[in-house]
Image (tube, rainbow, N blue to C red):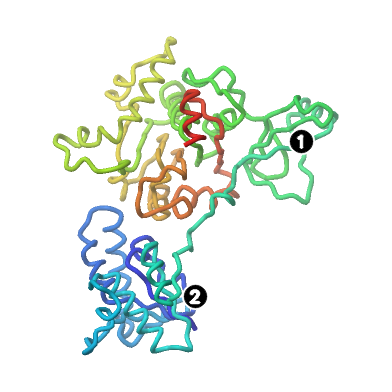
Amino acid sequence: MKNYVLDTNVLLHDPNSLLNFEDNNVLIPIEVIEEIDRFKRESSELGQNARTVSRSLDSLREQGSLNEGVELENGGCLRIIFQKKLKSDTTQAIFTDNTVDNRILSQALAIQKAHPKSHTILVSKDINLRIKADALGLQAEDYETDRIQIKDLYTGMLEMMVSAEKMAAFRTNGELELNGGNTYFPNEYCTLMEETNPKRTALTKVDPTGKKLVPIIDNREGVWGIKPRNREQHFAFDALLDDRIKLVTLMGKAGTGKTLMAMAAGLKKTVLDREFRRLVVARPTISMGKELGFLPGSLEEKLAPWMQPIHDALEMLSDLNMGQESRRSNDLMRSGSIVVEALSYIRGRSIAHQFMVIDEAQNLTPLEVKTIITRVGHGTKIIFTGDPYQIDNPYVDSSSNGFNYIISKFRSQAIAAHIELQKGERSELAELAANLL
């Protein structure tokens, strides 16, 4: 049986992490409880998670003594640990300062010394704490239950070589049966190429059953003034405009057109086709670099710095679509057809019959993503856009963010589609910067 000593950031990252260590001992230092107490008054997601942890521990306290250990529903045992003050304080003996991290390390070392036959592991999302633990001969691990490695991430696309006869049959029948043996996911996009002439291609996708290929929606004429410039953008517009698909994830580096295409499709579906009540565009309020401090003014004025990229995209779409149906973005926002908001206030809502675009989704945790998707009501379509290599949230990284999490979890679902946009189209300079820098 192993002894897992948990750091505060593990519980704040995933309040349900107590149940993810199988039938082993889960040990929480008393300092972690004190830190959670400091977070619980915050109105942020961290505050919500802290309150969830406190309630979970309180319910376990009613089942037995947290000092002696309470059995968890998965067969493990939870215990709150603390060190009695000794004449030679081990913390002061090892470290020069008596910080919370050092006291947690000291307690983990004491557990390792008291139970030499059991495997003691410190679990923390703090890299420096793991380094210090390793230096002291204590095994340390990151919390990896919800980690998804980018190199193994589902791309949503594949290529397939077929004979000239099969290509002709596909163009005639509008479908092509897939051979057995390989696993294909619903809405996985496929480029069919003719064996004798690879330049002859057809853009297709796997149907909801996963057994045949069907053509994608033809969007060569463009959507709200935006014309697809490459194969991935054709795939993206198909997913965005397919009424059967309710969740779309668009992943790509800066300048690949993720947000612009999502908003163009949303405007078409909302303003022109009137299939949704409004277009809702939201993004997490996490800045790049140093914070600006408290901003004066109304809620709209406070959110303006974070929402300006969305307004820029709306202005560009207004300029591009100069046809009879064109309307300025300001007019659409005043009429309520477009709503721009922060994700901070989404908890508790039920959002029905709306086209939702969640921008910069790589800054969300898996729990935040779950909170957002569970707000979706009947008739709503939700699009997540993000780049796992541009993360500003200090509490997630390229493997533990919620954006990668939903891509991995929803790939086998018939109502979801994922496209990885690879070619930058913003400008030649932006494409060079994304690749070189």
Could you classify mark 1 by the number of other residues whose Cα lies within 10 Å: few (under 14), some (14-19), or many (20 or more)? some
Distance in Å between CA atoms under marks 2 and 1: 45 Å
Query: Which label was assigned to residue 22?
Result: 2
Q: Nearer the viewer, residue 390 or 385?
A: 390
Of discs 2 and 1, which sits in the foreground?
A: 2
Instruction: Determine contact: label 2, label 1, CB under 8 Å.
Output: no
Looking at the rendered structure, the kind of residue marked 1 is Leu
Answer with left or right where residue 404 lies relative to residue 66: right
Q: Residue under label 1, please give it.
A: 176
Left/right of residue 264 with respect to residue 329 in the rendered view? right
The vertical placement of 286 against 409, above or below, is above
220 to 70, vertically: above or below: above
- Residue 58 can be seen, yes or no: no
Dot 2: few (<14), some (14–19), or many (≥20) neighbours within 10 Å?
A: some
As rendered, which of 370 and 108 lies closer to the eye?
Answer: 108
Say which mark, if any, is on residue 218. none
Report helix, strand or loop for mark 2.
loop
Please, what is the three-letter code of the amino acid marked with disc 2? Glu
The percent position of residue 59, horizontal first and vertical second, equals: 31, 75
Earlier residue among tags 2 and 1: 2
The spot of residue 119 in percent (x, y) is 48, 82
Under circle 1, the secondary element is strand
> Can you tell which quarter of the image residue 167 is in?
top right
Give the x, y percent position of residue 184.
68, 46
In the rendered image, the vertical position of residue 289 relative to residue 202, given as above or below:
below
